[in-house]
Image (cartoon, rainbow, N blue to C red):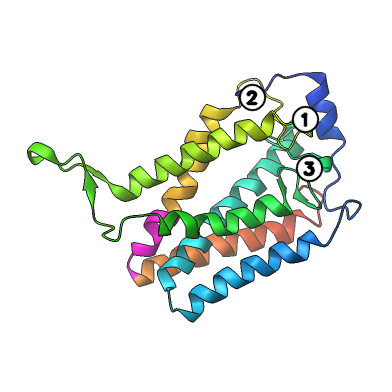
Amino acid sequence: MFKFWGDGSQAAMDLVNQIKVRSTENFNWTFIFILAVVFYVYWSEVHKKNTEVVIAGFALYGVHWLYEICNAIIGHVFGYPLWSVSNESTTFILLIGVCWELSMMFSLAGIISFKMLPADRNKRYFTKGGKKGISCKLVGAIEMALLFALFESFLAGTSNHSFIWVYKWWGVLPVFITTYVPFFLASNYVPDMEPKKRTRFLCIEWGLVALLLIVLIPLGII
């Protein structure tokens, strides 16, 4: 049921070669429903003036898009990306490693992670004996990253190949360390930055996402 590493098999390579990016062949109405749910969640937070919650969502979602773009570039340059999604597992594939359902989940993941932090976000664990301890934001990021990495290992083992890992050295551990930890560090730390710094962070982050998409999609790179 769980798969912890890629196997480098020809079967995995064949699955990746069959991926149809941005094809509407499997499109259905769940696309619209999921989009409506995301809009409802964000607009509810905006209506409540929960600015920090919205920032947490956008901070993680922007990192997610930068990672997906990099993954698609890796696939273009080296033949296979670090991770892929199969045609059978989704209604619409945005880039070779991310489908609509997955991307919309990540649009909410930052909000969920931020809301799961203690009310006092300055709280630190293991402070006994004069030790400074560990920030609850860091602990929360690690916990969420571990949960997501384990769930991805489940997806990689599904019969419809929801996730496809080709490279033998890519799996749960590198996903946990290099991907999910940065995701949740962004959602847990960016909202508490000074207003000017977090605005700068989001502008640079999303400006880079927009620029890469505008340039690389027409060129057929991603």
Q: Is residue 41 left or right of residue 48?
A: right
Q: Which residue is mark 2?
A: 3
Most common secondary structure along the magenta stretch? helix
Q: Which region is colored magenta?
A: 187-194
Q: Position of residue 18 (x, y in %)?
A: 87, 36
CA gap, disc 1 and disc 2: 11 Å
Element type at mark 2: loop
- In the depicted view, which residue is nearer to us: 31 or 71? 31
The residue at which mark 3 appears reads as 89
Amino acid type indicated by mark 1: Ser
Q: Are marks 3 and 2 in contact (CB under 8 Å)?
A: no
Residue visible at 62% across and 66% down in the picture:
38
> Which quadrant, please, contains the N terminus?
top right
Where residue 217 sits in the image (x, y, percent)?
Answer: 78, 55
Q: Residue at position x 76%, y 66% from top?
A: 32
Amino acid at circle 2: Lys
Name the element at disc 1. Answer: loop
Which one is in front, 74 or 55? Answer: 55
Q: Is residue 187 visible?
A: yes
Total marks placed: 3
User: In the figure, 132 relative to 189: above or below?
Assistant: above
Amino acid at pointer 3 = Ser
- State the image quarter where residue 85 is shown: top right
Between marks 3 and 2, how big is the CA–CA gap? 17 Å
Residue that badge 1 annotates: 159
Percent x, y of residue 131:
13, 39
Q: Residue at x 47, y 34 (%)?
A: 177
Asked if the magenta segment contains residue 213, the reply would be no
Disc 1 crowd, CA 10 A, few/some/many (<14, 14-19, 20+):
few
Residue 189 is a magenta residue = yes
